[in-house]
């Protein structure tokens, strides 16, 4: 997989005030570093159980499309990732979220403490739970959520709604079963991401979640993530799948991207 690495200068992170968040931010470096988990219980890989927290690794075989499927090459390549990465090149462009494939029924938890601003039903028949961090107000219901949203996308059975206050780690839903190829393997999916308004732009912007981990929890979260990476690479027999040495493992790009970034240049179309 050839990926063009784009570098950006990461300015010191700062907490937002309600006043400045109402119109958006000038740069993603202004987003608050408040992520306390990856949307589910992740722990260091335990070879005696084959799990890394709720993430099953041992014995998992990625789905493979039939030879006559026109999307076989790209889908099979993407399906190597039990944990996908932000900025991965796919058919639609660059992936703006991280995906985790977890046993069906796994509970999804809020990544941050804040307010639920949207729980829209998606094209896939499941839901997204979108939470504004503390200090950021929700827009009126049905008017677009908030200027900054931490998303757990593709979930079933959400148990929170607009205006609910949630704590990081609180159960909010279950993983989705909409990916039929992974469902046949006994796994569902949840995607995590950050969506935000950028001042002067009408495009939907996204940032890599790994850049915004809560400082006191960052080391433990990264340790567990890289432990899971290494275990999955060993299971798959491919030690080139992830780069655990990156400052932000899981971010192939540190650049902010939109839903329609050019897959060659990494820049917004």
Image: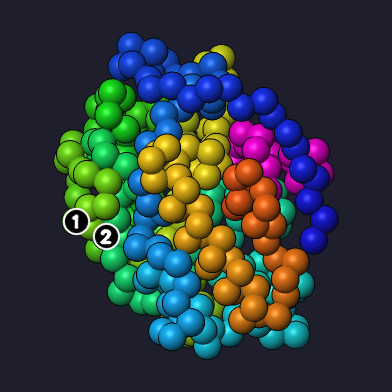
Query: Residue at image x 20%, y 43%?
Result: 166
Task: Give residue 249's position: percent from left, percent from top.
Answer: 61, 51
Task: Give residue 56's position: percent from left, percent from top.
Answer: 45, 77
In this view of the protein, can residue 225 be seen by the observer? Answer: yes
Task: Give residue 49's position: percent from left, percent from top.
Answer: 41, 84
Q: Earlier in the sequence, mark 2 or mark 1?
A: 1
Residue at the spot of label 2 = 173
Q: Secondary structure at mark 2?
A: strand
Label 2 neighbour load within 10 Å: few <14, some 14-19, many 20+? many
Magenta span of residues: 252-269
CA separation in Å, label 2 and label 1 = 6 Å
Query: Residue at image x 42%, y 33%?
Result: 33
- Eyeballing the image, is 20 above or below 228? above
- Eyeballing the image, is 137 above or below 172? above
- Eyeballing the image, is 120 above or below 15? below
Residue 159, label in figure:
1
Query: Residue at image x 19%, y 50%?
Result: 160
In this view of the protein, can residue 124 be seen by the observer? Answer: no
Q: Secondary structure at mark 1?
A: loop
Q: Quick check: marks 2 and 1 in contact, CB under 8 Å?
A: yes
């Amino acid at each position: 997989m050839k990926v063009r690495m784009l570098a950006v200068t990461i300015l010191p992170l700062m907490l937002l005030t309600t006043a400045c968040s109402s119109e958006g931010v000038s740069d993603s470096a202004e987003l608050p570093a408040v992520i306390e988990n990856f949307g589910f219980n992740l722990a260091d890989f335990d070879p005696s159980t084959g799990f890394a927290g709720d993430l099953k690794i041992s014995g998992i075989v990625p789905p493979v499309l039939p030879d006559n499927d026109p999307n076989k090459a790209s889908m099979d390549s993407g399906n190597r990732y039990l944990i996908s990465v932000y900025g991965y090149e796919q058919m639609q462009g660059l992936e703006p979220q991280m995906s985790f494939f977890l046993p069906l029924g796994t509970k999804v938890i809020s990544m941050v403490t804040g307010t639920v601003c949207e729980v829209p039903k998606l094209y896939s028949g499941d839901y997204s739970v979108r939470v504004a961090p503390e200090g950021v107000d929700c827009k009126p219901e049905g008017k677009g959520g908030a200027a900054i949203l931490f998303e757990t996308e593709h979930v079933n059975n959400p148990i929170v709604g607009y205006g609910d206050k949630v704590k990081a780690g609180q159960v909010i839903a279950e993983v989705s079963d909409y990916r039929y190829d992974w469902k046949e393997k006994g796994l569902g999916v949840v995607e995590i991401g950050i969506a935000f308004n950028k001042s002067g732009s009408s495009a939907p912007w996204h940032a890599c979640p790994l850049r915004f981990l809560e400082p006191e929890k960052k080391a433990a979260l990264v340790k567990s993530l890289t432990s899971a990476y290494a275990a999955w690479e060993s299971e798959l027999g491919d030690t080139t799948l992830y780069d655990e040495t990156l400052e932000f493992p899981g971010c192939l790009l540190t650049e902010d991207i939109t839903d329609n970034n050019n897959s060659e240049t990494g820049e917004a179309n």
